[in-house]
Amino acid sequence: VDDFVAGGMENASITILTSATLHDEKAHIDFRSEPLVSHELAHQWFGDLVTCKDWSHLWLNEGFATLMEAIWRRHELGKDEFVYDLIGMMDSYLAEYGRYARPIVTRVYKYPDEMFDSHSYPKAALVLWSLASIIGEENFRKGVKRYLEAKREQNAETEEFRRFMEEASGLKLDWFFEQYVYNAGHPSLKVSYKWDDKQKILELKITQTQGEDSLPKYRLPLELVILGQDYKEERKFLIDEKQHTLNLQLPSKPKAVCIDPEFKILKALSLDLPPEELLAIIGSCTYLYPRVIAARELSKKASPVHIDELAKILLAEEEFWGLRSEVAQTIGSIGGQKARDALLNALSHVKHPRVRRAIVRALANFKEKPVADTLSKILLDENESYYVRAEAAASLGKIGLKEYVDVLARALETKSHNHVIAATSLDSIALLLGDEALATVEKYLSPDTPMPLRRAAIASLGYMTPTQRVISLLEEASRSRHPHVKLAVVSACTRILSPKVMPILEKLQQDVSGRVARNARDALEQVRKHVEKGEEYRKLREEIDKLKEEERRLSERIERLEKK
Ligand SMILES: [Zn+2]
């Protein structure tokens, strides 16, 4: 279905999918439809055959459907793709957690649509995967099968699901559901270690550092792989205290310590280690998850001396693309000429489009002409993948050099999957030119413009001064019947943040689509806060002016007194 409101809808025996998922061979190197198909197919069981009793148990539908996307990846593309998908799920949950935290099962919501968030989808999928890891995948499958058979054509709730899992595994699982399903937040582990060469002991410190909105202590079975010169040790621990110190006797100094190597347990992980140890994990660990965590940690601590080693991984075609993409970001965050040259050099060697995309994204950190020239060439190069070219358009916008608007304007004519190149170019033009881009943007606002381009045009009005013209264009778009158009209006409003957009948002807050209503409500809140801040600033300004005036009068008085 064209311009469908979501990716898909799992109507029993006749799933609807958005036509946006159709793509040509060229897009196929960057884009797959199977995860969407797997998701909706999974709903035939989780959602249709067995339906969650009410919205508070929505995770029983969406958690499973989301996990099945990852399971398809593992089946078709391999373990690294699977684990990288899990890492991506954690990222999108954490992004939402930055705004709010709620228990997965909750009755506190204003609109049912609010439940369709990253707690019900990716976080729930990770919770299911953690559960499967703890009770064993075979038991998990057995329990799920029993659950589906017993609750067939009925409604189910979380407690029933728990009982099937307990029955299949023979384990009490109330603690697991309590900490992951009925409570908000998640465990955060900080890990550090040091090696005592005399005693041949590795002292490993694991601290639970989660904040107020999570439980003070979690119970976590944690796996550990230690890789040495000629040994590999696997250990399992139960983490249930705020802090653990483990002393591990080892044959020799380990090359790398890999925490939860297969990302079996939902948690945030930070490695309190010097850059050299982090590099050792990236270089010698054979599991993806610890390497990605180390690469991200290194972004905060690395310096130019680490670039050569990182560049080797970036260039290694045999390494997994996800790791190489992370490493590109790490190099980008180091900054400086050496980092820039390493990334530019990689562009002339690296083939994998996903890695190229990450390099192009990292290059946005370098706000200079030679970089922008390279990105312009990529944007206009028909041999590049659609998504690499779109990323080049985005980076040109972020770099902020106005003279590249012409190149971006040429890219507006480019045909690509879901108009991704044209839409991103339009966004960057508006970002670079602000008000001057209005005439260009207006060409793409009409209802006969393809939806992705029209959405980009509407959202890019947010980069402009909220003149009467801009506000009336947004008002007009907000009267569209299409939720996607209205959502684009909301994102423009959150960029503008002026009281002038409040009437538009107030109206959209009453929208029939819960998603539009919710987004409008959040945006309105943001505008109000912004206006209040402006108000506070104004008051502060007045106070200062008053104080200055008093000071002036005082000094005049003193002067007069002194003269007497
Ligand atoms: Zn779904």
Image (tube, rainbow, N blue to C red):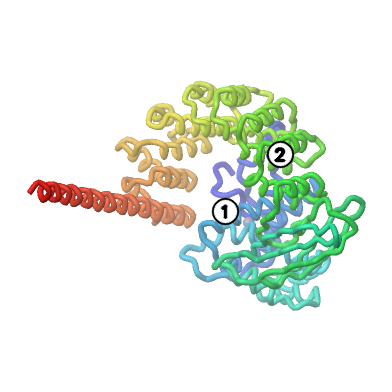
Instruction: Identify residue type, mark 2.
Output: His
Q: Residues within 10 Å of mark 1 (few under 14, many from 20)?
A: few
Measure how far apart labels 1 and 2 are at the Cα level.
29 Å
Residue in the image at 79% along x and 55% along y: 257
Q: Residue 373's quadrant in the figure? A: top right
Q: Which is more foreground, mark 1 or mark 2?
A: 2
Where does ligand 1 appear, by image quarter?
Answer: bottom right
Instruction: Identify residue type, mark 1.
Output: Ala
**In the visual, does 461 lie left or right of 102?**
left
SS at mark 1 in the image: helix
Q: In which quarter of the image is the N terminus?
A: top right
- Report which residue position mark 2 lands on: 306
Is 9 located above or below residue 354 in the figure? below
Residues at marks 1 and 2 touching, judged by CB atoms closer than 8 Å: no
Q: Which mark identifies residue 177?
A: none
Q: Residue 27's quadrant in the figure? A: top right
Q: Residues within 10 Å of mark 2 (few under 14, many from 20)?
A: some
In the displayed image of the protein, which residue is found farthest to the right? 230
Is 509 located above or below residue 389 in the figure? below
Say which of 18 and 387 sits in front. Answer: 387
Q: Which mark identifies residue 95?
A: 1
Res. 316 in view: yes
SS at mark 2 in the image: helix
Marker count (numbered): 2
**In the visual, does 554 lie left or right of 32?**
left
Residue in the image at 39% along x and 53% along y: 524
Q: At which x and y percent is residue 10?
A: 64, 56
